[in-house]
Image (cartoon, helix red, strand yellow):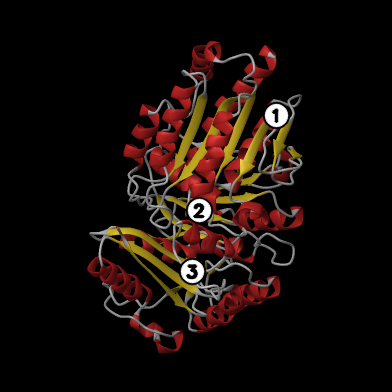
Amino acid sequence: MSCKRVVVHENRYADSVTLMGIGDNVKKLPGVQLAEVQMGTPANLEVMRGLGFDIPASASANDLVIALAADDAAALDAALTMAVDSLNHRNQQADENVNSLDDIDCADGWNLCQISLPGEYAAAEAEKAIRKGMDVFIFSDNVPLADELRLKQLGEGHDALVMGPDCGVGLLDGVALATMSIVRDGPVGIVGASGSGAQEVACIVEKAGSGVSALIGTGGRDLYPQIGGLSMIKGMRRLADDPATQVIVLVSKLADRAVMDKVLTHADQIIKPVVAIFLGSDASLFAAHRVHAAFSLEGAALKALALCGVATDGFAFTQAQIDAAIARDLPKLRHEQKYLRGIYCGGTFAEESLIYLKEHNPDAALFCNLKTRYATQLANPRQSRGHALIDLGAEEFTVDAPHPVFDPTLRLKRFRQEAADPETAVILLDFITSPGVHPDPIAPFAKACAEAIQARNGALVVIASICGSAQDPQDIAACGRQLVDAGVILTGSNFQSTLLASDWIKALEKRS
């Protein structure tokens, strides 16, 4: 029999990354069976009640809820103490803790402020930090666009980088921010308006044998006309002055044409080589500029390394390897297995795949939960049809549930749903590792993949890539072995997975 306890901290906020880390650490204590440390959103409360916790009816989305189960009262007390101390930063090893930006003197060496607050409070704290001369990394979302513009203009006046709002990755002075991987040092500097896209470029650079000097995130709205690329331009200038950076890479989804031209014009004035990828663009965007154009995340990483003099022979897939993989597995499939299904946690990865699949399979019907010109939008995002790619990080899935990089539960459920569909032939997966995401996002999928492939007597193809670095706590080498042992085809990048998936669509359409 277990002991249970629920504690509600009214009107207290902490971001999901922090809370997940606290919960995972508490679970490691002896005798602790369950540790849920979450904001009281309807979805989180439903999960906790489903686990048998008696949550007060008064608990709301503004409250922080700790729900614990342990073998005995002593283990329960220890778990609660650790959770509360972690929330109050009592068990940090830092030399100094401060409770307010007002207590900081930048002469003592403070130069960066990371902000994870509700959007309504984030701008005011960011302004304090900027006026003190600090760079700011704003993880918070739901910050008004007018506040973003004001903060970035203020940053210009104080020579401060403003990364965000809604900035998911950063790497400065060797410190990984938010959900960024711990990529080793090297000559490539990255400025990214796409978080997962910039992280993928950085991780490919490491996998191909080099490293990254810095990764400066801008937030996804930086290339909006209202903002005008202020952080991307500022980030380029910062890297142009950085002696450790030899080549600069710009990473973004397709954005406003005038803003992209403005950014590229600034890039033309930089002496160092600049590689740029705007996912979905064509060569015409770069025709009037000096930058080195790339059209895939892998292509941007490999081009940057070539400009650094780093050989990358053998990293990319060959057509012979793709043909051999399909020839091996196609005969195993049943006649009714007709379709490819992609189940993504990285929105940029889903878009990169859609762009390539649409261009190279123009006659195949593609479906997606996203509103995009590359596929027909699914009427019901929870039910696939045809060749379908699903971004589980989209708002319809995360409005009342954690993003899949923080909690893989819903995505794992969707995988099992697609694997059980008799029309599914190929499943495409992406994984993201870092200190800031789920501590073990791959092992549950490796187990589920092995079970699904065995249930079909081998008549199911699963393709996966891992966006992560060797120093990430998840141990991507071990994770990769788990997937391969489960029967998964593991590739070196999302783009390589897409190349294989594209030819699988051709083979399935031809067979049909």
Q: Which residue is mark 3?
A: 55
How many residues crowd around disc 1 within 10 Å: few (fewer than 14), some, or many (20 or more)? some
Q: Which residue is mark 2?
A: 190
How many residues crowd around disc 2 within 10 Å: few (fewer than 14), some, or many (20 or more)? many
Report the Cα–Cα distance between label 2 and label 3: 45 Å
Q: Secondary structure at mark 2?
A: strand
Residue 359 image point, x, y percent: 71, 30
The residue located at (39%, 56%) in the rendering is 244
Residue 495 image point, x, y percent: 55, 34
Q: Do we see residue 169 in this rendering?
A: no
Q: Secondary structure at mark 3?
A: loop
Residue 368 to residue 84: above or below: above
How many residues crowd around disc 3 within 10 Å: few (fewer than 14), some, or many (20 or more)? some
Q: Quadrant of residue 177?
A: bottom left
In depth, the one of 94 and 290 nearer the eye is 94
Amino acid type of the residue tagged 3 in the rendering: Ile
Q: Earlier in the sequence, mark 3 or mark 1?
A: 3
